[in-house]
Image (spheres, rainbow, N blue to C red):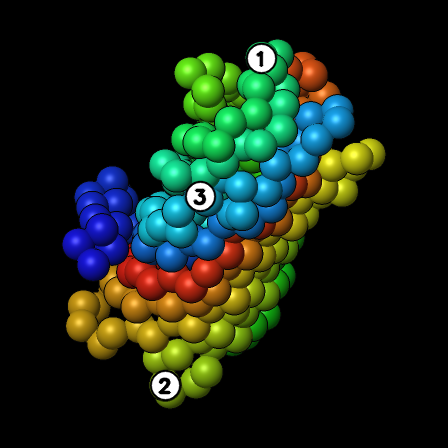
Amino acid sequence: MKKILTATALAAVLPQANALPLVDFYAGGYYWDQTYSGELKDSNTEVDLADDLNLDNVGNNVFYAAFEHPIPLIPNIKIKQTTMTTEGDDGSLDVSFNLGGTTLTGSTDAMAEADFSHTDFTLYWGLPLPLVTVDFGLTARQFDGSMKLESNNQTAEADLNVVVPMLYGKVGLDIPLTGLSVGADVNYIGMQGSGITDYDVNLTYVLPLIPLLDVGITGGYRSFNLDIDPEDFGGSDDDLSAQATVAGPYLGLSLHL
């Protein structure tokens, strides 16, 4: 739970928003309980992330900050950083598999390290509706990850280091007189042989504690679905090619000034 509380550190970077009428600052973070499934791919073979590599289901942190203003033609800005790392120490690789240009021969023992971490840079617009949030825009998702395998005294590694353009949307509803709001947001891209769908649904309760600063407790469920050929986004054939799903519940804090 201490990891969740680190989200409050983001409040320190927020300026004095009460001096800027009609301008909103948002920040927050949550601890995401992640379950991993899917496959690694080469030209001939697939290796299962759960059954073969036995990747651990772990928890990681997500942090975000956003700035909104009332000027219609200029987009609002949101930055979100998602850590998505895990490993498997007691997997098996019973087939030959090419990863990052290195072919691993089959072995009864295999160790794996997976990193699908990424940072989203989102420009978006919102409709001026009472009680209801409707946002839409574009996201540039910068992956900064990799996959590493060790098997039969051999090591292979492939990078996941591409920028993926995605559509962005968000809907929400404030429930009057309760402090509760419900919402959902999604990023999506479908392109040639690749596709990413990343969505979450959430419920937030704003604590009646501090004037001018909304502090909320947020819980929800997020599902990240990746099917990527890095050559579709300017990568090389030695970069990571994978189909992966990372999903699970999360809990965290949100700030609105």
The numbered dot on residue 228 is none
**Between discs 2 and 3, the one toward the N terminus:** 3
The numbered mark, 3 or 1, whose residue comes first in the sequence reads: 3
Q: Position of residue 46 (x, y in %)?
A: 67, 35
Identify the disc placed on residue 178.
2
Whichever of callouts 1 and 2 sits on the residue coming sooner in the sequence is: 1
Q: On the picture, is 243 further left or further right than 8?
A: right
The answer to whether residue 195 of the structure is visible from this angle is yes
Tell me the crowding category of disc 1: few under 14, some 14 to 19, or many 20 or more residues within 10 angstroms, Cα based: some
Q: Which amino acid, by three-letter code, is at mark 3?
A: Leu
The alpha-carbon separation of the residues under discs 3 and 1 comes to: 21 Å
Q: Identify which residue, 54 or 59, lies in the foreground.
A: 54
Image x and y of residue 160, in percent: 55, 25
Task: Identify residue type, mark 2.
Answer: Thr
Q: Which residue is mark 1?
A: 102
State the mark number for residue 55. Answer: 3
Dividing the image into 4 quarters, which one contains the C terminus?
A: bottom left
Indicate whether 100 appears above or below 214. above
> Closer to the observer: label 1 or label 2?
1
